Image (cartoon, helix red, strand yellow):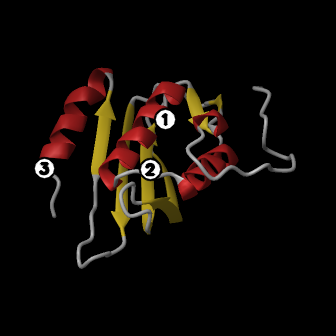
Amino acid sequence: MTELKNLGKITAYKYDYSPEFLEAIPNKNSNKNYLVTLTSDEFTCLCPITHQPDYAAIKIRYIPDKKLVESKSLKLYLTAFRNHGTFHEDVINTIADDLIKLLEPRYLEIEGNFKVRGGISIVPFVNYGRGEFEEVAKKILLERKF
């Protein structure tokens, strides 16, 4: 088993982008295709221009390969965006890039449902597919309904 830095230990929270929080554990079922869904309804970051808070529900879905994201590390990682100035579209792509680097998943998608501010809500979506899932990712992206 991988030596985890945070699970079962006292947590030192950070409130700015901290990708070092993310940790992976071995996937004991890597011989199967299955979908993992993780949802955070309390995501917060800051507008990089006005520094006003932005609130979102973040949904992460992925088909793992050899690794799974350790859920406490994901919670700490997402919490660390609290005082980070970033646009909605950028934050979703940053999370995707960090999880792809960590997990090397077969498929991954992330949606951020940002709350209305200034009369507009923004819902960025990004996905990624590797190998047989590359075409699946492209199809899902192009066929998404509003």
Secondary structure of the residue carrying numbered label 2 = strand
Q: CA distance from mark 2 to mark 3?
A: 18 Å
Where does label 2 land, which residue?
Answer: 60
- Residue nearer the viewer, 128 or 112: 112
Q: CA distance from mark 1 to mark 2?
A: 10 Å
Left-right relation of 26 to 1: left
For disc 3, the neighbor class at 10 Å (few under 14, some 14 to 19, many from 20) is few
Q: Quadrant of the C terminus?
A: bottom left
Mark nearest the camera among 1 and 3 is: 1
Asked if 34 appears above or below 145 in the picture, the reply is above
Tag of residue 119? none
Q: Quadrant of residue 126?
A: top left
Q: Position of residue 25 (x, y in %)?
A: 67, 32
Identified by mark 3, the residue type is Glu
Where does label 1 land, which residue?
Answer: 99
Identified by mark 1, the residue type is Leu
